[in-house]
Image (cartoon, rainbow, N blue to C red):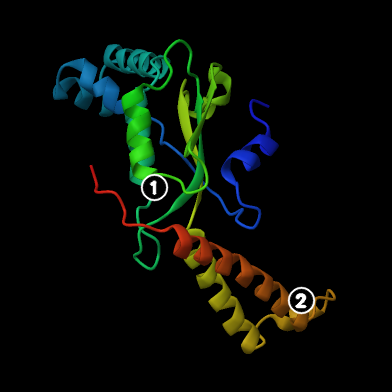
Amino acid sequence: RPFDPGDLVASVCPMPSLKCVSLSTAPAPNAHANVNGGSGGGSGSSSSVGGGGSGSSSSSMSGLRGAAARPAPWDELVGGLVARTARYDLLDRPVLTLASQAVARGVGTEPPDERSRARLSQLLGQSPCTPHPIDWKLSSSPATALPSVGALRSLTLVSNRTTAAPMLEQILLRARLQLLGRAYVHHFERYGVAAEFISERAELVQTVVDDYEGARAAFARPSPSAS
């Protein structure tokens, strides 16, 4: 186990009542695109896709293995995370990031460069809770990267952000409407879960929404301009 979950909670959840986190891993690089780019022309890639000679097929397989053996550049992985990380919440408001942890696996002798780190920091913005908005965790072993797709390097971002409030509010609204119409209530009551208990749990989740909205009201500021 490369990282301690307790350390993750301590890093990403600095405020006791705000413990909703989002997790995103940069997509694995497209090895097939790397092969095509290195083959020097479209005709070669076309013949291999069409199942031509055994020589072209063997060359493609060799190229795929070579692409998988080359770790993806950090700036490419950061770009993948940037594309997956929202700047605005469901209510079209700028997102406030409370704390984040970036987990880089398969670092080897080449850790994430300062430019890549700065790009991720600019996306998330400054944190009102900690002077270090991103806690970087580096692992040299590629065994914990993305072995299922042959990736020797991966980058995962775990963030505690105010996007949690409107998402939970949306879930609560649906749950309360269903509870009002007593939808599915008889299924829960069969196992001893009364409608009153469900309503109480909904109110508990509402306090989480209120706490996130309170943090947003206290700390929110205009979002940084997009780079």
Front residue (pair 42, 158)? 158
Front residue (pair 115, 63)? 115
Specify few, some or many for label 1: CA neighbours under 10 Å numbering under 14, 14-19, or 20 or more.
Answer: some
Q: CA distance from mark 1 to mark 2?
A: 36 Å
Q: Secondary structure at mark 2?
A: helix
Q: Is residue 41 left or right of residue 12?
A: left
Front residue (pair 226, 83)? 226
Q: Is residue 68 left or right of residue 191?
A: left
Front residue (pair 51, 209)? 209
Q: Which residue appears at 47% of the width and 62% of the height?
A: 218
Residue 206 - label: none
Residue ID for mark 2: 188
Picture coordinates of residue 25, whole percent (x, y): 47, 38
Q: The C terminus lies in which quarter of the figure?
A: top left
Q: The N terminus lies in which quarter of the figure?
A: top right
- Which comes sooner in the sequence, label 1 or label 2? 1
Residue ID for mark 1: 85
Picture coordinates of residue 187, whole percent (x, y): 75, 78
Label 1–label 2 contact, CB within 8 A: no
Picture coordinates of residue 162, whole percent (x, y): 47, 58
Quadrant of res 68: top left
Is residue 185 positioned above or below 218 on the image? below
